[in-house]
Image: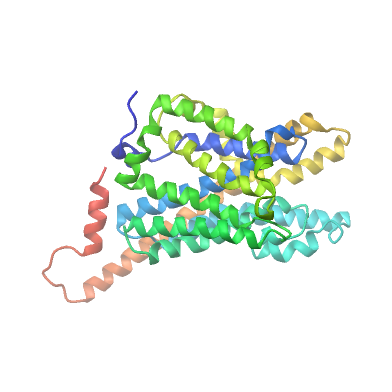
Amino acid sequence: MSSLTHADYLALRRFPALDGLRAIAAVLVVFFHYGGPDWLQGWAGVQMFFVLSGFLITTLMLREERRTGRISLREFYLRRGFRILPVYFVLLLVTVVASAVAGTFLSNGIGSALPYFLTFTNEFASASPFGQSWSLGIEQKFYLVWPLVAIALGTVVLRRRAAAAALGMLLALVVVNFTASHSNPGWPLHYFSILTGVLLAIALHSPRGFALLRPLTSKVAQVLVAIGFVCVHMSVKPIAGLLDGIGGIAGHVLVIPVYALATAVLLTAMVAPGPATTFLSTKPMQFVGERSYSLYLVQTISATVIAFFWPDLSGLGQSVVVTALGLALASVLYSTVEIPMINLGRRVITRQRAKTAVEDGVSQQGAPQAPTPQSESSRLATIGQAQP
């Protein structure tokens, strides 16, 4: 079976299998929190989210740079802001108001944790009804810092960026030793997972890096990688047991880098067409994947409603019902908050581009025109558009 070429990869405008991976990750997390079987180890779904996030964000940045010759920080932060913040703050507000009405604003932990949630230092907050948002604290800091680092390291210099990502991964491994006694031990390793996705995006964007990973993109390799990943996932608990206590660190913390690297291998295989990609791209997978962010955030509200009306429900039945109600609520949020705000963000960016174009045009008309070839930025944009 033939494998994907680098030109084919760069020509892809969408990675359809990623919706399915997001769907699996979100459901795993909900099952872990609300009655799912222990052998499923659903907590690892967050690490899959982290790798996917690092990969997608960096891929979009690199392709924007390749197309236009630059990365627009303003547009990047606007896209992230309109995508992440509206649903986050809507559900935070609902949680705060519901806690206040129930008289549990202080006793359930939301009161003391609220400053952390408002400053996206969620991972350091104590337990509360919005505690599942801890991963947003990790991701928001990544969104803030990584684009700045990528630009500072220079346009198109992929080796510098790859070295920075690798250095960050190494630093996460080192720093984790100093956080073993923290209330959230091992939090630096979550950045290891994100940077694993970053490094994968850089590798696949580079012709040389893609050539090394290309064998994983054949249809046969895709099936084998998918089976191998399932085996790794099902072995998370035994692996954590083997690693437990090394350096005085819990095994479930030390297994994170193993799982992140396995996810990166899986993700490489899933960018290409194949049987696993076809399954992950089905309409049910796409439906859940598109709503995975809202599902992740609304799970506690869903579980609270189920517990009120069905207090004796537990185990697998609880996880299934909480997921089903969570998907219903997530669908409402997706259509009334996520999509409208994403579209609003796009309109804001479009207006800003038009305004900038007009201002540039006026500036150019008012300045003396030198009889020189097109500007370097225009040339890079033209080259970017011409490339496959």
Q: Is residue 27 left or right of residue 38?
A: left
Residue 375: image location, x then y, percent: 20, 65
Q: Evaluate whether residue 333 shows in this view.
A: no
Figure quadrant of residue 332: top right
Q: Is residue 380 left or right of residue 10?
A: left
Q: Quadrant of residue 260?
A: top right
Q: Quadrant of residue 185?
A: bottom right
Task: Work out whether residue 230 can be spotted.
Answer: yes
Residue plotted at (64% across, 45% down)? 294
What kind of colouring is applied to the model shown?
A: rainbow
Could you tell me residue 31's position as x and y percent?
71, 36
Please give the count of numbered marks on the rendered protein: 0
Q: Is residue 231 or residue 377 the one in the foreground? A: 231
Q: Residue at x 86, y 34 (%)?
A: 310
Q: From the viewer's side, name the closer residue of 343 and 282.
A: 282
User: In the image shown, does 191 or 169 lie closer to the viewer?
Assistant: 169
Q: Indicate the position of residue 246 as horizontal and vertical percent values.
A: 66, 50
Quadrant of the rendering where the N terminus is positioned: top left
Please state the horizontal and vertical placement of residue 58, each as a whole percent of the image.
43, 52
The image shows residue 41, relative to residue 349, as above or below, that is above
Q: Residue furthest left?
A: 371
289 left or right, relative to 56: right
Vertical position of residue 190 compared to residue 36: above or below: below
Q: Residue at x 44, y 65 (%)?
A: 148
Seen from the viewer's position, the closer of residues 304 and 174 is: 174
The C terminus: image quadrant: top left
Q: Image check: 332 left or right of 21?
A: right
